[in-house]
Image (cartoon, coloured by chain):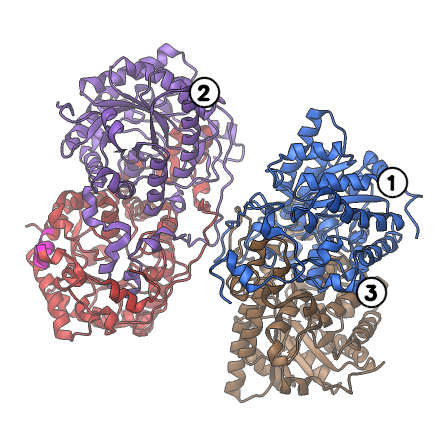
Chain colours: A brown, B blue, C purple, D red
Amino acid sequence: MGSAQDNKGLLQRLDEGVVIGDGGFVFALEKRGYVKAGPWTPEACVENPGAVSQLHREFLRAGSDVMQAFTFYASDDKLANRGNEAGKKFTGRDINNAACKLAREVAEEGDCLVAGGLSQTPTYLSGKNKGEVQEEFRKQVKVFTENGVDFLICEYFEHVEEIVWAIEVCKEAKLPVAANMCIGPEGDLHHTSCGECAVKMVKAGADVVGVNCHFDPFVSLEAMKLMKKALDTEGLKAHLMCQPLAFLTPDAGKQGFIDLPEFPFALEPRICSRWDMHRFAREAYNLGIRYIGGCCGFEPYHIRAVAEELAEERGKKPIASVKHDMWGEGLRMHTKPWVRARARRSYWEKINPSSGRPYSASCSKPDNWGITAGSKELKQHSEGTTIEELQGVFSYIKA
Amino acid sequence: MGSAQDNKGLLQRLDEGVVIGDGGFVFALEKRGYVKAGPWTPEACVENPGAVSQLHREFLRAGSDVMQAFTFYASDDKLANRGNEAGKKFTGRDINNAACKLAREVAEEGDCLVAGGLSQTPTYLSGKNKGEVQEEFRKQVKVFTENGVDFLICEYFEHVEEIVWAIEVCKEAKLPVAANMCIGPEGDLHHTSCGECAVKMVKAGADVVGVNCHFDPFVSLEAMKLMKKALDTEGLKAHLMCQPLAFLTPDAGKQGFIDLPEFPFALEPRICSRWDMHRFAREAYNLGIRYIGGCCGFEPYHIRAVAEELAEERGKKPIASVKHDMWGEGLRMHTKPWVRARARRSYWEKINPSSGRPYSASCSKPDNWGITAGSKELKQHSEGTTIEELQGVFSYIKA
Amino acid sequence: MGSAQDNKGLLQRLDEGVVIGDGGFVFALEKRGYVKAGPWTPEACVENPGAVSQLHREFLRAGSDVMQAFTFYASDDKLANRGNEAGKKFTGRDINNAACKLAREVAEEGDCLVAGGLSQTPTYLSGKNKGEVQEEFRKQVKVFTENGVDFLICEYFEHVEEIVWAIEVCKEAKLPVAANMCIGPEGDLHHTSCGECAVKMVKAGADVVGVNCHFDPFVSLEAMKLMKKALDTEGLKAHLMCQPLAFLTPDAGKQGFIDLPEFPFALEPRICSRWDMHRFAREAYNLGIRYIGGCCGFEPYHIRAVAEELAEERGKKPIASVKHDMWGEGLRMHTKPWVRARARRSYWEKINPSSGRPYSASCSKPDNWGITAGSKELKQHSEGTTIEELQGVFSYIKA
Amino acid sequence: MGSAQDNKGLLQRLDEGVVIGDGGFVFALEKRGYVKAGPWTPEACVENPGAVSQLHREFLRAGSDVMQAFTFYASDDKLANRGNEAGKKFTGRDINNAACKLAREVAEEGDCLVAGGLSQTPTYLSGKNKGEVQEEFRKQVKVFTENGVDFLICEYFEHVEEIVWAIEVCKEAKLPVAANMCIGPEGDLHHTSCGECAVKMVKAGADVVGVNCHFDPFVSLEAMKLMKKALDTEGLKAHLMCQPLAFLTPDAGKQGFIDLPEFPFALEPRICSRWDMHRFAREAYNLGIRYIGGCCGFEPYHIRAVAEELAEERGKKPIASVKHDMWGEGLRMHTKPWVRARARRSYWEKINPSSGRPYSASCSKPDNWGITAGSKELKQHSEGTTIEELQGVFSYIKA
């Protein structure tokens, strides 16, 4: 198994310019039929490797500099949680191992780095101790190092305490560590401010810090500003990273899009356009963020839009731009003249798209549960959720 | 090259039950980076066959009974129109041939039929005569028959005159013919009513008739009602077929979604949810439509929703339902209890999703150009569109 | 009691130019505290004559050429219906008589005509016969003629059969008769088309025909087009009249705004702006309508907008324009410069106002009850509605 | 000229319970045809006293405990500003004097207090000194005391410096002083926080403090919370007062509704329903506010809703409730059964009204000018604004 050792490493690339991340695997593969919404685990790496490779390849063509191994939620405790059958068929090791190999294989089709990723664990949510939680992380990191990944990502953590534990384990591997919490400007679920989260991650050893998932690009950049300001105030140095949702969430509460009533099966009207991503990429870059990618909802065309917006800074366009003239210019080849007339930046830059939904509102009232790690409702259990359990919480649910 | 001769053919399947079509290749592959918006031609069949196969496979897993060869707009005149470079690299024959082989290959992974498809031509829009138009069709049909497709589809025609010419050519091949116009309840662009279009298609020899593209599922079903009524009135027998957009278009005018200002790069807020597709499938079935599929915007998960809604009628669920418990039941495995509480049909069936876009309206005012076949603005030319041409039409466009 | 005999009568005025009607008394006086929503009866003429006079005066100043005596629903059967206490205190004669005197008194402050009005009766809705219904009308018309009104208006009828009976009674008084149904383009509640309603009203003797209430200005004009076309086809001559709502109702069904869930206490977001009324006045005029006024929701400033739009045709501005420079020009005197910048027609003509309601949709799903005259739920009864009655219809209502 | 000396005074009433204010005179009388939008001055007191009295009477019937003399913007400098002709016909003394007499006359029809009011001056906006500004106030206060008003209100001030000057002048009159700034949670236009504004007003001698105008009820209550908290922190005692807009303004910036593009002629979709006012009254009361009324957009029915919500606390319903059964119960007398079914609190309390405007958004992008007192664009000048002046600021304006 090769490594990107001939290439520049992550930190050198970030020092010299922009690194473009990839998009959201669980949401994209759910729509393609390979991931189950609910458990959201990545057994597709073993079950349908071709589908996973194809998505890697699309992101590579769209401009991603990083092939992030599809290891989201691939800890043993998550694979066996609440009726998920993945854990009966595969170990975390099986999946993490397959994921690394797929990522490397496609990475070698371009000039890409490979990253292994950790994410929050049911063990932590169940209130277990630091040793137990870190043991889950350590099992994954071992597979990542065996596979020679180029760096490690801790992402999708709602509690800074847990991500600090994850970073500590990653540091044992002597690889660069990027750390992202899935928080917005209100901070983590234990009332830690955004700024304080950033400071703690850097102090724990993260080389790159930021946010991913849970909020839209523009809400996420508000959180990034707070992180940046706190790091500056503390005189701490770290690269900044942002991999937000591709769903608009101005109405989300502290816990982000999972609290919106539309999550996860009716988020369509919130999907960002490619033009939203141009704006995101520019604003992120101007803010000093150098690792720019996406999370749930980000499809290859969203990443391509990021790469096209930053084409000048990067000195190149992504491969997939061969099928996408900038700012809609390809429409000059459309059959109808009024569509050809839309082939210009000023048209798309300003468009405010209608929803075609006259019975729908602009905003939702999110669920706003206050429970966090340790609450009994969050405890891991391997059997499925029963109707009785649901009724215990929501008396209006009928069998 | 095999054929589905051991299997039941299209018409027998339609007599006995439901046939599920596939979704929209040009839009899906545009987002994946393999098709250019504007020309919308399918050279990906030659350039990136793996990406095309993967999409076929996803539709197969989602429940499609038909692998429709990706031959949309693959006529020689379209490949060379208005600056499209595809025509310089490949002939229509190259692409049609590759498309058929890819479709058959995946079809054999399941119990699927393969179809070859014709669509409207720049030759017709340029006002050329019947002989010239039919010659374009004949070249494609020849490749289809050489490849042993199971049936032929004429689709995306805006003028009933042209689709009748296409059907006539298809009939020469002695294969079943399905014919779809991209019209809504207002009828074709030459003021022919929906009902009259259906009658003409059947009289020309189509075995299956209906609409595809240009309008959302529910507007399309209004058009289908008009077609059905006219056929009943005339005492004509034909199977009904509907492959609409997966974008909501209550505000579109006669020419459908291409007139909406959001077409094609800001349609995101209009994307149908899987629950919209459950409703579409049920309403289509109740109306007597037996060939039910999708066009632009339909992703594999939309087709899966159609197949899940009709699981009882079909006596089976699609393969990809292994990763999708019905009506969101998979959410019982979610980490958070309030998301688990959404694991029920009554929740998703009634959801009215918000857009997260407080500055956007519900409806758009469509462009409503009246030009049709023969207008100079529609004439084929092989060179690209110039700024001067655009300015001739829209004086407000600046260089 | 004087009369407008020195002035030109209604028909002469309509022959020569435009007649501007007044606005909606029941809705305006409900908001001012003098009319009860539910029964909607006009006992304020006796109880609070000053408040009624003031509203007449405001419409006169706004440009109304007609002081319509506030006799809406002032038939004896309506005053005593379903718990309405007005009927215990006053007879229909008391109220109609007071209403005529108030209207005349203010009319003489300008060059206005006075009209007495009839509207639909509980007697008809209860399925009583023609003689009984006409007897209710005859009692009112007698008071109108004693008071020397200049003409009669039949308005707010949902069934053409009943308005024809009303017209017949009015014709006995040898006064001009204007007849308006509260219907939209779908016609009356007995499936009579708009056009047929117009024809029947003219054949019954109406000099002026049209629609009032129940739909917004633009939906109402669609109904007017159908009426006009039918009269033209039949070769019938009549003046046209339109007094619509000042609430936007694109989503209302056949029975208009009373079916909308917001009726009558949450219609605020639908209120038309003065600029909507400019457009209404111009479109009505261009359609050949010469009696242009308003119904529920029309406040004095809406009528002033109609009069200002037609100032050139009428050769004068309304009195109240002394406090309203055309097209917002008065804003030049505002303190803030950016508000002064809005002092121009091009700004207000194109404004598309936001709702400030991010949780609200654009359209409502109306109740669509199919019951009409004769149904038991519509029968008059003098006692109030009980909870049990409501529960009989809506099982979900709790005591 | 009598006074309310037999009655309880303002402060005693506030100590013992709730005082309900009145609604917005300039907006209500603009729609009735007696006030010009732009200058917004109250010369109607002299020109059309009957119209002013009628509006007082409607508020009295709706539950107002205070007849606020209609003296808004009745300072000599404002009457002569930017082309306003009111100043050529009347002095400030004429108008203030007439206003006091009209208010007292109607107050005596009930148990009401009379207040005289001061508001911000062009003199201050023009950067004149304290002496000059206070001289404008002193002229008005002199007329108020001659007329024996019961207390004084300073309202609609955007700068705390100016309202402090106004309070100082009011204190010379030895009457209770209520002071309201037209600010939201962001504070005054000179960057003074809400809390600091409250503290300064109380320290200057105000007995009652709060906010009026510029923001909707719920945004205004956010500002009130900040004021209350600051007073508590400082250990200062004062009664709290809130008289907000009846227009929803979640999207307004620091300067409130005048920055919204809809101001002042297209605000209709934002008008609060009576049910919004029930909620406002309850939330204000729970927050400890005891002087609760309204400003622009508040019509008599909005004040009635406040009084009905607080009927139990006040031990009485307003007079006008004789025409308004609580929570829509009067609908039991409606003709149609499905409207009768809406006669219940649970229906109206939860209604989320649609706008009937499918082309409109929920939110507006406000103008956000940063200019404040002293800027040249704000300077008083007596001549009207010229097109050239407007073009100097907005180059896109055409003559």
Do the CB atoms of the residues marked 3 and 1 lie less than 8 Å apart?
no
Quote the CA–CA distance across marks 2 and 1: 56 Å
* Residue identifier under label 2: C373
On the image, which quarter does residue A319 sit in? Answer: bottom right
Badge 2 amino acid = Ala
* Residue identifier under label 3: A50
On screen, A369 above or below A291? above
In the depicted view, which residue is nearer to us: D336 or A340? A340
On the image, which quarter does residue D110 sit in? Answer: top left
Q: Main secondary structure of the magenta part?
A: helix
Given the current orientation, which residue lies at the most extreme bottom position? Answer: A235
* Residue identifier under label 1: B9
On screen, A254 above or below A210? above
Mark yes or no: residue A48 visible: yes
Quote the CA–CA distance across marks 3 and 2: 67 Å
Q: Residue at x 11, y 64 (%)?
A: D174
Residue B265 lies within the magenta run: no
Task: State the mark number for residue C70.
Answer: none
Q: Which residues are magenta?
A: D89-98
Secondary structure under badge 1?
loop
At which x and y percent is residue B9?
87, 40
Quote the CA–CA distance across marks 3 and 1: 30 Å
Residue D79 relative to residue D348: left or right:
left
Residue B325 relative to residue C390: left or right:
right
For label 3, count other residues whose C-alpha is less than 10 Å away and answer few (under 14), some (14-19) or many (20+). some
Mark yes or no: residue A251 visible: no
Secondary structure under badge 3?
helix
Q: Residue at x 36, y 43 (%)?
A: C279
At which x and y percent is residue B209?
73, 37
Tag nearer the camera, 2 or 1: 1
On screen, A205 above or below A101? below
